[in-house]
Amino acid sequence: MRFGIVLFTSDRGITPAAAAKAAEERGFASFFVPEHTHIPVKREAAHPTTGDASLPDDRYMRTLDPWVALGTAAAVTERIELSTAVALPVEHDVITLAKSIATLDHLSGGRVSLGAGFGWNTDELADHGVPANKRRTVLREYLEAMDALWTKEEAAYDGEFVKFGPSWAWPKPVQRHVPVLIGTAGTEQGFRWIARSADGWITTPYEQATLLERLALLAKVWQDAGRSGRPRVVALDGKPDPQRLSEWEAAGVTDALYGLPDKPESDVLAYLDRLAAKLAPLGLTA
């Protein structure tokens, strides 16, 4: 099992570059950041954890651009994976987003993966012209169109929401395939979507108690879809528990992800030291 860090970025506290550098120095394998372009003040969408329009954290309205944030992290690191938990691709122009991700993968030496979500905040999506009832379709078209731009000398796409004719687009990613992870609830519908269009699953914060049964469902859906191997599973964890992590790994979890506190840099670095010490007996090595 690999261990990673997620920084809920904002315009205060530790910077993504400092956090990623510190995580790499302590042996962590991956560094994730989230995305919200903005938060509409008036909205109908309920947050998944609060159940209403209130937000559990004011950083939702303060998040940094994920690709700029990861670019700064790439410049000061050499090995750590650079990813998102989760980005909202459909809130961007698909061609320019493909260029941004390919450029980051090119400049980082092939260290990028794309953690994407459908978007719980449908009011936010509406401001970007994305119909709430079509957001899964739009995301599938985005992923297919970006893959074409990343892999073909002359790329084209003709979908319901994405259309462009034969085009040249460089740089290509260093990786032959940029891994795509989907952050969504662990339902059969969500797993069918992943098995068709992605490479793995990022769990939600409220699924820890039922994770083992959800992993069994994911494995079945993956196999039924004719996918080979096993999906990558990035599980959000709280305090490391050796027994729980062992059970998760046996059930198919490939990565455990730990969030950083919203505190000054010195406090975050001290937290990383404590976390690394707890994970060292479980295989984390600097």
Image: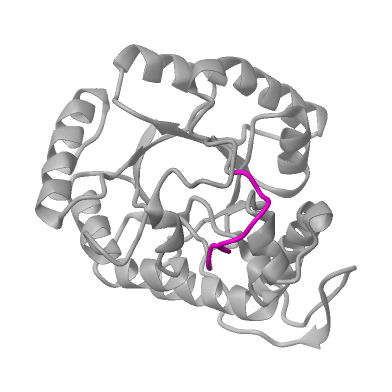
Q: How many marks?
A: 0
- The residue at the point 58 percent across, 64 percent down is 40
Q: Is residue 71 above or below residue 121?
A: below
Which residues, given as a range, are shown in magenta? 38-46
Q: Nearer the viewer, residue 105 or 237?
A: 237
The spot of residue 39 in percent (x, y) is 54, 62
Q: Nearer the viewer, residue 221 or 160?
A: 160
Q: Nearer the viewer, residue 212 or 265?
A: 265
Which colour scheme appears in the figure? one colour
Quarter of the figure with the C terminus: top left
Q: Is residue 76 above or below residue 54?
A: below
Q: Is residue 266 above or below residue 196?
A: below
- The residue at the point 76 percent across, 65 percent down is 130
Q: Is residue 87 above or below residue 45?
A: below
Left or right, 279 with respect to 29, comes to left
Does residue 164 show up magenta in the picture? no
- The residue at the point 19 percent across, 36 percent down is 276
Please identify the quarter of the rendering in which residue 17 is found: bottom left
